[in-house]
Amino acid sequence: MLNGIRIKSINRFLDERGFFAEVMRVDWKDLFEQDTIVQTNHSYTYPNIVRAWHRHLRGQTDYFLVLKGLIKICAFDDKTEELTEVISGGINLQLVRIPGHFWHGFKALGNEPAMLLYFATNLYNPKDPDEERRVWNDPTLIPKTINGKKEDTRVGKPWDWNYPPNK
């Protein structure tokens, strides 16, 4: 994975009423390091919609938590041309840390909408947003490695969010 991306599995405590889960704790230093969460956002995304690409150049880090559905989260480093791909879903709760300087985004997978709760280390300022954007299907975004693998069949080609799984 790209340096700084981390995944923390979230434990569910089940009983006859349902479950309880701690989704964020300030003492998770292995995940947060020195980060302080200052804003929480909720995203509802219809199936097969891609929300990409953007990055933050003023030090923001994002933490993604899928509550419902399934998403493919990707982060791309322009300098190394490495891409990290993480599949995350409400079935198996996990908190995914994405340093904002990487181009990042996600695609809602499956047949149901995805509900994403995401936490940011900087406040959003609509008058001066910390977002640089590129189109979701940018033909110049060509990974040299995907999850550290050079032999992935998608390497060396423009990133295709719609590439069929297990091909």
Image (spheres, rainbow, N blue to C red):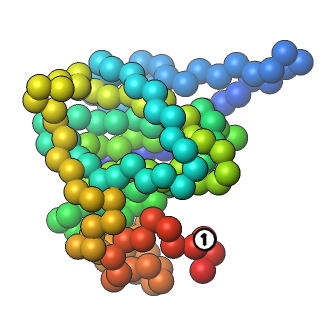
The image quarter in which residue 97 lies: top left
Q: Is residue 82 above or below residue 1?
A: below
Give the farthest residue toward the right. 16
Q: Is residue 70 above or below residue 128?
A: below
Binning the other alpha carbons within 10 Å of mark 1 as few (below 14), some (14 to 19) or many (20 upward) gives few
Who's the residue at 63% across and 36% down the image? Answer: 68
The image quarter in which residue 130 lies: top left
User: Where residue 166 sits in the image (x, y, percent)?
Assistant: 63, 75
User: Where residue 83 sits in the image (x, y, percent)?
Assistant: 36, 64
Q: Is residue 159 above or below residue 103?
A: below
In the rendered structure, the answer to whether residue 101 lies left or right of residue 22 reads left
Q: Nearer the viewer, residue 85 or 108?
A: 108
Who's the residue at 42% across and 45% down the image? Answer: 6
Who's the residue at 47% across and 83% down the image? Answer: 153
Image quarter where the C terminus lies is: bottom right
Residue 3 appears in the picture as rendered: no
Q: Nearer the viewer, residue 25 or 110?
A: 110
Q: Nearer the viewer, residue 103 or 115?
A: 115
Q: Secondary structure at mark 1?
A: loop
Q: Which residue type carries mark 1? A: Pro
The image quarter in which residue 92 lies: top right
Q: Is residue 134 above or below residue 142?
A: above
Residue ID for mark 1: 165
Give the number of callouts: 1
Residue 75 appears in the picture as rendered: yes
User: Where residue 102 sits in the image (x, y, percent)?
Assistant: 26, 52
Who's the residue at 33% across and 20% down the image? Answer: 39
User: Where residue 32 sits in the image (x, y, percent)?
Assistant: 37, 30
